[in-house]
Image (spheres, grey):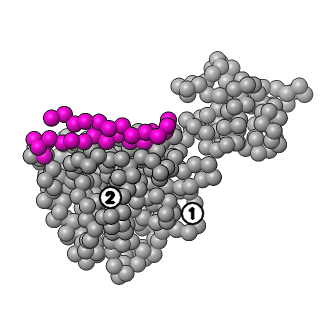
Amino acid sequence: MARKVAQVHSGSPVGASILFNYSDEQVKAKPQMASAPRHSWTYEELMAETFPPMRWVIQELLPEGLAVLSGKPKIGKGFMGLQIALAAASGGHFLGYQATAGPVLFIALEDGPRRIQGRLKKMGVPATRLPIDFEYEWPPLDVQGLNELRVRLAKGSEWGPYVLVIIDTLASAKTNNIDENNASDMASLVNSIQQVAQRHQCCILMIFHHRKKGTGDPVYDPRGSTATPAGCDTLLGLYKEPEAYILRTVSRDGPELELRLKRDFVDSFPWQLIGRIGEVPRNIAQEDILDALDVLQEADVATIAEEVGKTYTPVSKTLKAMHADGLLRRRPAKTSRGSDKFLYRRATKDGKMSWDSEDFISQEGCANGGKV
């Protein structure tokens, strides 16, 4: 029986697609469990070995290994974790990125079954079979929980080996004997969890809180000791900015991404992709500049500032940021007095320069003292 596809969108932003209605044959046809890892290699053996490709639970976003999704309290991390679980279990999409279908173990220690059910219904997910197992109680990882996780992953589900484990949250999955501000405590715990993920070739995604004073960097913002992010393979940081939400990712195995998101907890999937930073404006000021360039086509800072009704300095700073993000292209020119300046215009959709490349030189090619 072929799986059906249910598309759930809200306007133009990319929400998610859910594949559902697994057949009984698919349930019975379990993939084989991962073999025991080898720990000793000679140089010749290592170079001659053919390793399987990295498994991506969510392409470009979430590879196998240990990952952390962090953000401020009540920002919607739990919703995002549930959305990732649905995409992975169904082989659909998360924020427009393809997921690899496989069973999911969701250890929900902060939200009960009633709340999880309510969120699923709000998303419009059909009441059909999906390979997600929810656990609302779990022994602390530093007591018996880690051993129980090893046993559970070795056993797998009725659908086959788990490809994703979500722990919501790490703080609720340990005892107070593990001090999250203690580097030794957290390094020991996180390294042990990472070894479990590597042994079973799955992704373990831990949901974590941000510290009070954030930096905007998912490497430094998870609360407590820096040993926590240091021991992870992938870090996802969720941030609220004045005009949008931003998801930043850092990974040992994938690209660094910065995604602009829309949050809608009223209809369908709560987190939806607007676009990658560099493909969409970050804020209203940038949108105003793009609208002005639609009229002006190409202009210097002073002309753009006059068009948008702003002063020179903030417009100049915004233009620099938009150029760095790839939203704008620029070329050097001369003012009427012979000094240097830049002329800005929109970048084309394919990211190429929208004028002859022979006319374009870098900022370093401009004379010293030129204005940007």
The residue drawn where x is 33% and y is 74% is: 174
Point out which mark residue 214 bears: 1
In terms of image quadrants, where is residue 346?
Answer: top right
Disc 2 to disc 1: CB gap under 8 Å: no
Q: Residue at x 36, y 78 (%)?
A: 178
- Circle 2 packing at 10 Å, graded few (<14), some (14-19), many (20+), is few
Q: In the rendered view of the protein, which quadrant contains the C terminus? A: top right
Q: Closest to the observer: 98 or 1? A: 1
Q: State the residue at coordinates (63%, 52%).
A: 242
Q: Classify residue 19 as left or right of residue 110.
A: left
Q: Name the residue type under label 2.
A: Gln
Determine whether 169 is above or below 92 in the image.
below
Q: Residue 93: which quarter of the image?
A: top left
Which portion, as a residue range, is magenta?
A: 1-27
Depth check: give the residue in front, 356 or 258.
258
Residue found at the far bottom of this picture:
177
Residue 58, image x and y in percent? 34, 45
Instruction: Single out the residue that lies furthest toward the right.
Output: 337
- For the question of whether residue 241 can be seen, the reply is yes
Q: Secondary structure at mark 1?
A: loop
Give the structural element (helix, strand or loop) at label 2.
helix
Image quarter in which the N terminus is found: top left
Q: Please state the horizontal and vertical placement of residue 143, each as a whole percent of the image.
A: 25, 77
Task: Name the mark on residue 117.
Answer: 2
Q: Disc 1 residue type?
A: Gly
**Quick check: 331 left or right of 325?**
right
Q: Is residue 25 magenta?
A: yes
